Image (spheres, grey):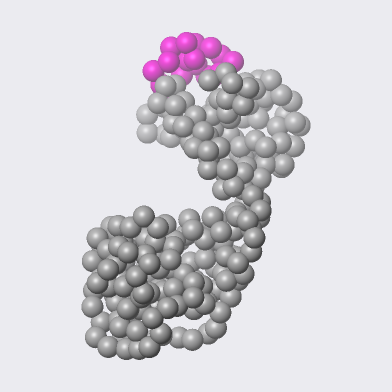
Amino acid sequence: MTDRIPPWSPYEGRTSLVSDGRTALTAAFSDVVRVRAGFASHELPEIFSAPADDGENDAARDLVRHDAEHMTRMFVNGRIATFARPLGGGDVVAISPTAWEIDDPLNRFATGALNLDHWSEIESPPSHRIFIDRPQFDEWLAGLKPLGFLTSRQVEEIVDPQLRAQRAVAERRWKSELPQSASLESDKSYNKQGAGDPPGVGPLLLTVSEVSELIGRSTSTIYADVKKGAFPEGIKLGSSTRWKKTEVLAWIEEQAGKRGDR
């Protein structure tokens, strides 16, 4: 029995680990990264052996880490049950959701294993393979949405977590302040309709002309910036495109932050 499993080595071959009604964590995670990020399982060792570059290599690793964290949340909240089987074979036992309350779960996804007795100690040699409930996983995977093509703005957020946080804070700020802000609601340059979001109908949507008036840029420049990933994408509604007001105002806040106007 091997007490060390090189990280990401389980993804190099096609070895299938069999367990009644369950699937190996590595097999399940291979499906997740293929659906979400478009990576084949054999690419994972290459992704994590590539040099740091503050660019595509780091972005790819962050995407995989994000998928691992997303899947871990399903384990923590009990939506997907996990199990442990001794390396080499033996009785299968349930893993408590509490055992997934760890700082960095990525190593478990990299090896597909854990030390059941010392589950919180990442350096402890693995003692058990990890399996997950197959029906529960299939239900979750069936509704999982792919990330799709990443815009330049999305890649920026992956590479620069602080930028992602700034954009999220800016959008939350506008969502919380706009309905109560008399000054903004009375300023037709911010809201031509002069009203907050109508109850029950979601965020106020702006036409490209309204966006143009709001930010002081031509419609052609707006479309060009969207294509470059430098401006929030609109929402297609039939043959028309609308922009969420909160996203546009968050973008304005982001630009102000770049010049120190916070």
Using the image as rendered, state which of residue 132 and residue 115 is in the foreground.
115
Residue at x 41%, y 74% (from the top left corner): 112
Quadrant of the rendered image containing residue 196? top left
Left or right, 258 with respect to 91, comes to right
- Looking at the picture, how far across and down is residue 126, in whole percent? 35, 75
Is residue 186 magenta-colored?
A: yes
Is residue 121 magenta-colored?
A: no
Using the image as rendered, state which of residue 173 and residue 86 is in the foreground.
86
Left or right, 87 with respect to 227, comes to left
Characterize the magenta stretch by its predominant secondary structure: loop
The magenta segment is 179-197
For the N terminus, give its image quadrant: bottom left
Q: Is residue 241 above or below residue 132?
A: above
Residue at x 49%, y 29% (from the top left corner): 170
Task: Specify whether residue 237 is in view.
Answer: no
Residue at x 67%, y 37% (from the top left corner): 230
- Looking at the picture, how far across and down is residue 42, in whole percent? 58, 75
Using the image as rendered, state which of residue 126 and residue 158 is in the foreground.
126
Q: Is residue 89 above or below residue 130?
A: below
